[in-house]
Image (cartoon, grey):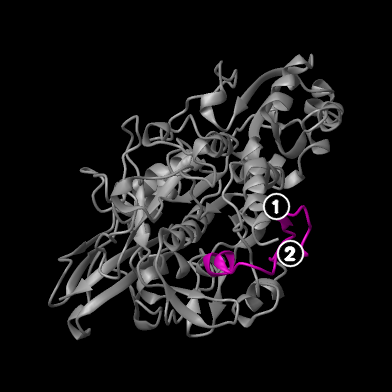
Amino acid sequence: MKNLLPLFLFLCTLNLISQEDAWVFLNDKENVSEALASPITILTQKAIDRKEMHNVAIDERDVPVNEHYISQIKSQDGITVLAKSKWMNCLHVRGSQAAIESLADLSFVSSIDFADNSLNTNSSTFQFIKEDPVAEQTRAEFTYGSTENQVTMLNVQALHQQDYTGEGMTIAVMDSGFPGVDQIGGFARLRNAGKLLNGYDFVDREENEFLFRGNNHGTKVLSDIVGFITDQFVGTAPDAAVYCFRTEDTANENPVEESYWVEAAERADSLGVDVINTSLGYRTFDNPAYDYTYEDMDGETAFISRGATLAFEKGMLVVTSSGNSGSDRISAPADARGSFTVGAVDSNGNYASFSSIGPTSDGRVKPDVMAKGQGSAVIDENNIIRTNNGTSFSSPIMAGAVASFWQANRERTNEAVIQVIRENSSIFNNPNPRFGYGIPDFEAALPQILNTTDYAFAKAYQVYPNPTSQDATLVLPENVENAEIFIYDLLGKQVKNYKTTKKISTLPTSQLKSGVYILQIKSNKSLFTQKLIKS
């Protein structure tokens, strides 16, 4: 028996390898006119409202795949259907090469694209749409504890201080598992607010049974967005609502995970999700024949990258980790035209050596921006605060920041939001393959996400000198008669408050200790916030 065991294992391995993965593209869909005439039959009202607000078309891509076609393909000998995509009107199938090739004889099949590119004799008929992403309330007072550095590095605390904490925003997280999220204290704020929404396990096709068990990567990722432990830990969007989707199978590395991801993105869109976080990346697989090369990192080759751009076209903002391969370059979907790709820095804002670099193979700037990914604070499944390394964590830190930022003006499109963030990043005028456009400053970007008139009005305020070692001078706009001035430290504690009726007045900054403060000026016309540095 011992001698037969190696042969048995070899035959099992051979049989596994002989099974191929492929995407089968279909010719058409059924009842398209009826569905588009009554979109509530295929989308939630929240999704419809978001699309209307951002002028995103509801089109044939939103109509589900023809179930009759799915049934016919499932009935073919030797074929297993593993996933489907309505956006690309295709099915992900597994079977022998011959069995898959025989599907071309079905009248409703338009083309077949094998994951092993050497088996493709004709290019797919998938039509890729090339659209480059363009280039008074009660204040939330948080003590950030372990997350202070990763929050203040991006000046997200300035968003929180104006109650932009992700309230009203919905985020979908695609990952490998979320153990503890349904029980531990670090997510009690989320659960108690009714904001842990229904998730789905696309790997095992279960609603929630396996979602909150297994691999803890998703738990730690999610904590950087909505985790909250009083005075110890605050995610960048602590009041956002979230969907948890399991699309990553940690037992295997196979292109079907790309299809799971696209299917999850389609569901997220139908549910009205605003932001997607993806701390996943694909370049190599268990079967080397499926591997992507750097030349494939052009935003148009990898199935998941095409899906990410379609998600962007549908109005969502897709935040993606760049990968942890350092100089070996980015992975998919970080190369997607529709991905807002995030690299990693350390606590001092220096490049983390593992952070995958760009550009894409067709020369586009990637990563887009950077956030803390070396020594990032996370909450694990046992409710313990730890530090972890990886762009897996710089991505959710950024995703939560983006959601809180977008909350300030929901009418701005995903394209506009991304461009404002880029323009307010540290090296916007001189991007490079390691840093992209640099580390964003969400405080500086905030006035620009507001209405144009509000932004112009805010620019009329002047505070100088800044930095200052003595008192500073405040100049109010011509049509502002009086204002109330607040000065906060970086933990959100108010240190000064006074009123002025003078067009030019003195800010009592000489009394402050050296450091960085947040200056907030309220008038009957606007709310103006900026960073104040006491040297």
Give the tally of numbered discs.
2
- Region of the chain picked out in magenta, as a range: 195-221
Residue at 74% across, 54% down: 204
Q: Where is the N terminus found, in terms of image quarters?
A: bottom right
Q: Which residue is mark 1?
A: 203
Q: Is residue 465 left or right of residue 275?
A: left
Question: Where does the image place residue 193, in percent across and percent down from the top left?
Answer: 69, 72
What is the C-alpha distance between the residues marked 2 and 1?
9 Å
**Observer able to see residue 480:** no
Label pair 2/1, CB-CB below 8 angstroms = yes
Q: Residue 44 falls in which quadrant of the image?
A: top right
The local secondary structure at tag 2 comes to: loop
Image position of 30 with respect to 423: above or below:
above
* Quadrant for the C terminus in the image: bottom left
User: Circle 2 sits on which residue?
Assistant: 210
Q: Is disc 1 surrounded by few (<14), some (14 to 19) or many (20+) residues within 10 Å?
A: many
Q: Give the residue displayed 46% in from the left and 43% down from the top.
A: 283
Q: Nearer the viewer, residue 307 or 414?
A: 307
Checking the image for residue 473, the label placed there is: none
Majority secondary structure of magenta residues:
loop
Q: Does the segment drawn in magenta span residue 82?
A: no
Percent position (x, y) of residue 451? 45, 46
Task: Identify the amino acid type marked 2.
Answer: Phe
As drawn, 289 above or below 484: above
